Image (spheres, rainbow, N blue to C red):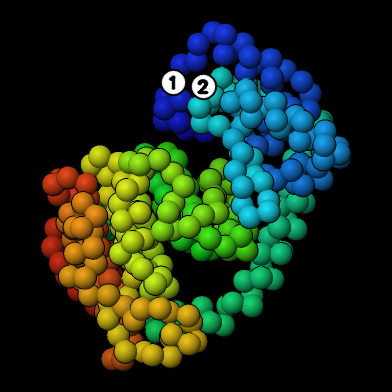
Amino acid sequence: MSIERRQEAGSIPFPEALGVLRAAAEETRLRILALLAEGELSVSDLTDILGQSQPRISRHLKLLVEAGLVERHREGAWAFFRLSDARAGLADPLLSGLDRTAPPLSEDRARLDAVRAQRAEAATTFFARLAPKWDELRSLHVPEAIVEAAVLDALGDRRIGSLIDLGTGTGRMLGLLAPRAGRATGLDSSHAMLSVARANLERQGLARVDLRQGDIHAPPFARASFDLVVVHQVLHYLDDPARALRGAARLVAPGGRLLVVDFAPHDLEFLRTGQAHRRLGFSAEQVSGWLAEAGLATVATRDLAPRESGQLTVTLWLAQDGLAQDGLADTETEQPQRAVA
């Protein structure tokens, strides 16, 4: 867990600290905390791993939530639990000092691995049904490696304290950017897609990413709470993309940035019926206008041209709160054969 996360957590008054430590000072609750240090889990996950009844696990979780050690969030009919950043100053040293190579923690970790393997298998089965459509769409624009390199180039070396990926889908942008962020969150309306993202991120060793189910038009987060907001290949699915960008802009912290990646205007009508696209791309001026209406200044755009005529151009828009000029300096077009630095 990062030093930045501990620093952001701040100090805790003595009476509250005493209550936190008392809540952790019980065998099952300490085992739960050690498991949640590996990533968010559901009650069902914890029941399977710890071999205890659901009411018993729920009671322990209730105490940990009340003590502020654990946060709870809903994902459809499911509830997921994760360690709270607010108590990281106390929890981190406690958990980092545990010997995880000996029982019961070693046994808990082995069962956690089994639960994750089952989750990954279910996610793979679900995504296999979608793969043909995704492969068809990928074939219509420059390789994703070029898009991702352009994203990294656009963002530069600036530190990312807190990141949110709106409409995270399979978690691809989180996998790319979360290692550079002090805190990373993904939002998606689909529980099934969040399951895919969770499995993908766990494979990459990014189990501490916070995944939430919610509406991109009304993201359930406080205003100005993220240094970087990403909206990657989402707008073309929406009836009201301007509203979604207003919601995204609301999350941008002072001096923070919003990165939009989507298609330039095109005439591939079959994407409406075959891929459920609501909009056939966006002009640079259209998205920049929406961003301006939302209170953000577009500091750069970049077009990634397709390999062949009749295919899709991918456009990146980088906007910022305030007038600081970070990232790309000009509007430019990347040719597919040209390597992106």
> In this image, 172 relative to 245: left or right?
right
* Type of amino acid at the residue the image marks with label 1: Gly
Q: Label 2: how many residues lie within 10 Å, few (<14), some (14-19) or many (20+)?
A: some
Task: Identify the residue shown where x is 67% and y is 27%.
Answer: 64
| Residue at disc 2, secondary structure | helix
Which one is nearer the viewer's eye here, 218 or 118? 218
Quadrant of the rendered image containing residue 98: top right
Quadrant of the rendered image containing residue 15: top right
Which one is nearer the viewer's eye here, 100 or 52? 52
- Which label was assigned to residue 89? 2
Q: Label 1: how many residues lie within 10 Å, few (<14), some (14-19) or many (20+)?
A: few
> Image height check: is 144 above or below 27?
below
Task: Identify the residue shown where x is 62% and y is 71%.
Answer: 127
Q: Are marks 1 and 2 in contact (CB under 8 Å)?
A: yes
* Type of amino acid at the residue the image marks with label 2: Gly
The span from disc 1 to disc 2 (Cα, nearest Å) is: 7 Å
Q: Which residue is mark 1?
A: 10
| Residue 254 x/y as whole percent | 25, 39
Quadrant showing the C terminus:
bottom left
| Residue 25 x/y as whole percent | 72, 17
- Which label was assigned to residue 222? none
> Image height check: is 214 above or below 86?
below
Instruction: Note whether residue 336 is visible.
Output: no
> Image height check: is 338 above or below 320?
below
> In this image, 129 relative to 274: left or right?
right
Instruction: Note whether residue 33 is visible.
Output: yes
| Residue at disc 1, secondary structure | loop
